[in-house]
Amino acid sequence: MFFSSFDREGYDDRYLAARSRIDDLCFLIVSGRISADDARNAFGAIRADYSRPDQENIELFDMIYGSRIERLCDQFVGGSTG
């Protein structure tokens, strides 16, 4: 995904990479190319990669992106298992 300089302003490359991976995952969910369980597992992997060096921001990451993944799974792949 392309980020303008405005989108990148104030964020480190690690966060931008995680955000890009989340966006790709969201596309897979919306297009129905991934199951809810696989989406949650993929989010867990992205979360683990992001949280290793940045434990202090993981709650915010979960609040923003974890809830986004759950909402999309519920809305597009009917996956309310977790």
Image (cartoon, rainbow, N blue to C red):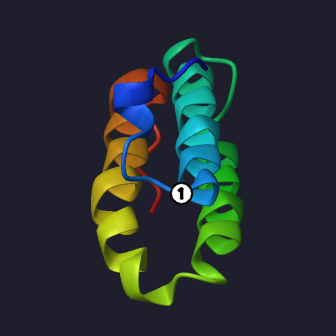
Left or right, residue 82 beside residue 33: left
Left or right, residue 69 beside residue 50: left
Q: Quadrant of the N terminus?
A: top right
41, above or below 71, in the image? below
Q: Position of residue 18 (x, y in %)?
A: 60, 50
Where does label 1 land, which residue?
12
Name the residue rendered at 53%, 31% in the picture: 23
Q: Position of residue 51 (x, y in %)?
A: 58, 78
Q: Nearer the viewer, residue 58 or 34?
A: 58
* Residue furthest to the top: 31
Q: Nearer the viewer, residue 23 or 79?
A: 23
Q: Amino acid at mark 1?
A: Asp
33, above or below 64, in the image? above
Q: Nearer the viewer, residue 48 or 76?
A: 48
Q: Position of residue 40 (x, y in %)?
A: 58, 53
* Residue furthest to the bottom: 56
Q: Nearer the viewer, residue 12 or 55?
A: 12
Left or right, residue 7 beside residue 30: left
Q: Position of residue 66 (x, y in %)?
A: 40, 57
36, above or below 52, in the image? above
Circle 1 packing at 10 Å, graded few (<14), some (14-19), many (20+), is few
20, above or below 48, in the image? above
- Quarter of the rendering containing residue 9: top left
Q: Quadrant of the C terminus?
A: bottom left
Name the residue rendered at 47%, 56% in the picture: 81
Total residue callouts: 1
Left or right, residue 26 beside residue 7: right
Name the residue rendered at 62%, 28% in the picture: 24
Secondary structure beneath label 1: loop
